[in-house]
Image (cartoon, rainbow, N blue to C red):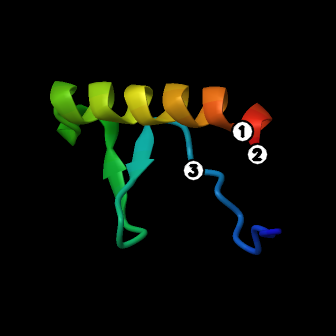
Amino acid sequence: MSTNLHDNTVSAGYWQDAKGALIPDAMVTPIDKERDALVKAIVARARPLA
């Protein structure tokens, strides 16, 4: 069992990179946005199986 000890909220208009830095939405490439959406969709489908 895993517990999340971090607050994962990010201000509107920003994305958080792997190091925790906030990146303005305009600087995030379209392919990175697609990758993010894909990972979130896969995780959403996998969670009920755990």
Q: Mark 3 vs mark 2: which is more N-terminal?
A: 3
Q: Mark 1 vs mark 3: which is more N-terminal?
A: 3
Q: What residue would you read off at disc 2?
A: 50
Q: What secondary structure is found at the residue carrying circle 2?
A: loop
The answer to whether residue 40 is left or right of residue 16 is right
Q: Position of residue 43 (x, y in %)?
A: 58, 37
Query: Looking at the image, is mark 2 or mark 1 nearer the viewer?
Result: 2
Query: Looking at the image, is mark 3 or mark 2 nearer the viewer?
Result: 2
Q: Which mark is residue 10?
A: 3
Q: What secondary structure is found at the residue carrying circle 1?
A: helix
Q: Position of residue 32 (x, y in %)?
A: 24, 36
Please name the amino acid that badge 1 sits on.
Arg
Q: Which mark is residue 47?
A: 1
Please name the amino acid that badge 3 sits on.
Val
Circle 2 packing at 10 Å, graded few (<14), some (14-19), many (20+), is few
Q: Are marks 2 and 1 in contact (CB under 8 Å)?
A: yes
